[in-house]
Amino acid sequence: MHTVLLEHIRKYVTLTDDEASLISQKLKPTTIKKKEFLLLAGKVCKANYFVSRGLLRLYFINKKEQEQITQFGLEGWWITDYDSLDTQKPSRFYIQAVEDAEVIAWNKDVQEELILAIPQLETYFRKILQRAYAASQRRIEYIYAYSDEERYRNFSTNFPGFIQRIPQYMLASYLGFTPQFLSKIRAKK
Amino acid sequence: MHTVLLEHIRKYVTLTDDEASLISQKLKPTTIKKKEFLLLAGKVCKANYFVSRGLLRLYFINKKEQEQITQFGLEGWWITDYDSLDTQKPSRFYIQAVEDAEVIAWNKDVQEELILAIPQLETYFRKILQRAYAASQRRIEYIYAYSDEERYRNFSTNFPGFIQRIPQYMLASYLGFTPQFLSKIRAKK
DNA sequence: TTTATTTCTTAATCAGGATTAACTTTTTAT
DNA sequence: ATAAAAAGTTAATCCTGATTAAGAAATAAA
């Protein structure tokens, strides 16, 4: 059940068997069906979600009433609106399953409780946040370093498997352009 | 000397006086002059820098040989290339003083050492990384939610004091457009 | 299996911002 | 104080990617 989560944690810190079973006992996996939501805009974000199976997306609705995806959550990734989770203010984001998925929801109290019981978890979260922030810094670098067409070509060569799991309009949204433009650059060459 | 740093840490966690003086003793502030560098592209990033006075910028050189600023570091902010610092691979970034500044450099070993001695620091770093990551998520949202002109107008109304501390070409770079375009939108109204 | 709904494609026109270049103003160095 | 360098302005032209619209193809539902 929790193998994906526990393996992930153990890549960063060591856990005793007792600690591992405490985590398994405090947190229950949730399955969600394609198109179901974990978070809706206007609601306060309740948890940080570890994706143990499937695929999620995080997006907001822009002024043109279009969905703008800012993040995907694959197996082994964490996904949440940290701003809303931290401040307990309403979110502007949606978190939705792109495929049937399984997540392990860590809400604030459970996280605090488990960190107190298992100090290694504090180190774990510090380290994954550092990686997430580094990835986010690279993402911003990327946005400014390449044109839309270049970002699409880099993405397809770097993640050929992933682009087959999502509709093209979601990739276009994530890369910040229109589905029409994606069709156009796919057509030429 | 370390008052800005210690006050910052104490906004997130409690420190005893002994812990505070251990920090002061292990870390010495460095002053750097305007235009001096803390990091050069091609070099491995050695430390995470806490800015206790002045202003720094983090930028890379894009394919058009132009400086692309991705981050500023004001008093009370942390600035580093986490990717390079974490992986110990050469950075693609420069960190340079925009004004005369004072920083407190935390290199990897000192950070690990101080976290072991002062467990509260682990919590501190987890919390500031969470905030930094949340800010980075908002930044990406922002880039996709607004046009260049809108981002300039929002920025000027939200940070009127800050824009007076930096040359316009740096603001244009940070916002991802050319100085000519900035002149143009400033001219109209 | 047929219909309905989503997703993808193509093409014409349009707009936001880049590029180039010449010039002006401000700041820095001597 | 003067020269040199850095920063900012203006305007013409160009280009990347948006918009609009209509149709085709693929998926899902009945």
Image: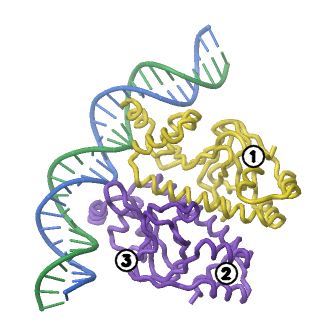
Chain colours: A yellow, B purple, C blue, D green
Q: Secondary structure at mark 2?
A: helix
Q: Which mark is residue A4?
A: 1
**What is the CA distance from the residue labelled 3 to the residue labelled 2?**
31 Å
Look at the picture and state if B32 lies above or below A123: below
Q: Quadrant of residue A125?
A: bottom right
Q: Secondary structure at mark 3?
A: loop
**Residue named by callout 2:** B10
Horizontal relation, residue A89 to residue A104: left or right:
left
Q: Quadrant of residue B117?
A: bottom right
Residues A183 and C28: in front is C28
Identity of the residue drawn at 65% across and 62% down: A89
Q: Quadrant of residue A164?
A: top right
Residues A181 and B158: in front is A181
Q: Position of residue A163 (x, y in %)?
A: 54, 36
Residue type beneath disc 2: Arg
Q: Chain of mark 1?
A: A
Horizontal relation, residue A172 to residue C26: left or right:
right
Residue type beneath disc 3: Lys
**Residue named by callout 3:** B35
